[in-house]
């Protein structure tokens, strides 16, 4: 086992952290929690354990230490904000052997800089939230199937849903060929022989999700923070698209195993407007809003990271309170704001 110790007289290492909010403004009095992979760390104030630092009015904090640990793990929290994910910084080191037993670690890098965004807690509300653990199977035959986001289920006869928030449409060219393979394999993957009838090509559109008139969805990029990955609210002024294609993607270098694509990727989210009512002039007077965290698709199961349905008409708030989930089941409960 290597024995690591602090080289007396080595320069002080420094971790500089900048903390901002979702609007780019500095966050003061935020706590920066710092941990190390080695216990051989001595901070500037003489402590030798995990460390906390506070940001000033400019949102900056600095942690100074002398130590033999090259790996630094840090995260940030502040009152009124969602906590950050944990970041990892590696200081370059040089390991020198001192005969006959000991090893010495020289720090070759002496400072690191990091910036992190905290997202404010605005108005978390009770909503219906679900995760992929619901294990809701997708229909595998060609057809048009309505899905209810409030109860996270298909409409009859494939489930107990009541209102279709969107429709999943399967349009494969050779239904008999595809059905036989899906029943055999019991997954979203399909095996074909090259050149046979019904063999799909990469990029072929084999289905889509669609929305009723005046309903639709738009897609955005996640924030990069797992504790708050998407948005506080829907934006009705955005363009809501009614049709999202599903294509064939390759999952095998030989082109034998093929799979249908997700509707949105793992780094995306989708905001949905559904259950729309209009006046005689076609103006929207009532609508419900939902969000889905990707990946989102229908490969044998309805795949979502999490879905959130706001049951209050015309309320664009999509900031879910995990402590007040309106879905009372034990399986597949959502936990992301």
Image (cartoon, rainbow, N blue to C red):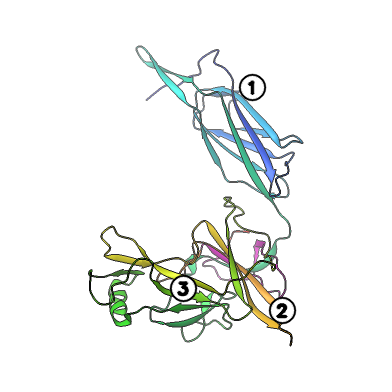
Q: How many numbered discs, if any?
A: 3
Task: Specify the segment rendered in magenta.
Answer: 305-334
Q: Main secondary structure of the magenta part?
A: loop
Crowding near pointer 2: few (<14 within 10 Å), some, many (20+)?
Answer: some
Question: In the rendered view, would you say 90 is above or below 185?
Answer: above
Q: Quadrant of residue 28?
A: top right
Nearest the viewer among 101 and 194 is 194
Q: Is residue 298 visible?
A: no
Disc 2/disc 3 C-alpha distance (Å): 29 Å
Q: From the image, which quarter does the C terminus lie in?
A: bottom right
Sequence-earlier tag: 1 or 3: 1
Disc 1/disc 2 C-alpha distance (Å): 59 Å
Nearest the viewer among 68 and 169 is 169
Number of the front mark, 2 or 3: 2
Crowding near pointer 3: few (<14 within 10 Å), some, many (20+)?
Answer: some
Give percent across and percent down for residue 156.
50, 86
Residue at label 2?
286
């Amino acid at each position: 086992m290597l024995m690591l110790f602090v080289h007396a007289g080595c320069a002080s290492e420094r971790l500089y952290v900048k903390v901002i909010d979702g609007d780019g403004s500095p966050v003061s009095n935020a706590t920066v929690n710092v941990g190390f992979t080695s216990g051989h760390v001595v901070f500037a104030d003489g402590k030798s354990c995990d460390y906390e630092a506070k940001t000033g009015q400019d949102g900056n904090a600095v942690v100074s230490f002398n130590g033999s640990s090259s790996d630094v793990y840090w995260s940030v929290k502040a009152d009124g904000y969602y906590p950050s994910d944990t970041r990892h910084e590696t200081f370059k080191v040089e390991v020198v052997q001192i005969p006959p037993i000991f090893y010495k670690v020289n720090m070759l890098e002496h400072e690191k800089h990091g910036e992190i965004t905290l997202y404010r807690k605005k108005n978390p509300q009770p909503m219906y939230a679900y995760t992929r653990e619901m294990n809701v199977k997708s229909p595998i035959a060609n057809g048009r199937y309505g899905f209810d986001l409030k109860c996270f289920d298909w409409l009859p006869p494939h489930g107990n849903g009541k209102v279709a928030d969107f429709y999943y449409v399967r349009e494969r060219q050779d239904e008999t060929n595809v059905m036989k393979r899906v029943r055999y394999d019991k997954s979203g993957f399909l095996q074909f022989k090259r050149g046979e009838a019904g063999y799909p090509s990469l990029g072929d559109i084999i289905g889509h999700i669609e929305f009723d008139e005046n309903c639709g969805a738009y897609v955005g990029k996640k924030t990069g923070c797992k504790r708050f990955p998407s948005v506080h609210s829907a934006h009705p002024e955005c363009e809501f698209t009614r049709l999202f294609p599903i294509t064939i993607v390759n999952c095998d270098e030989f082109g034998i195993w093929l799979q249908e694509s997700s509707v949105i990727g793992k780094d995306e989210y989708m905001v949905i407007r559904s259950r729309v009512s209009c006046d005689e002039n076609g103006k929207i007077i009532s609508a419900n809003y939902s969000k889905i965290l990707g990946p989102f698709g229908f490969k044998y199961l309805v795949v979502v990271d999490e879905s959130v349905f706001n049951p209050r008409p015309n309320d664009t708030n999509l900031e879910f309170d995990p402590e007040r989930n309106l879905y009372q089941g034990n399986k597949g409960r959502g936990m992301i704001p």
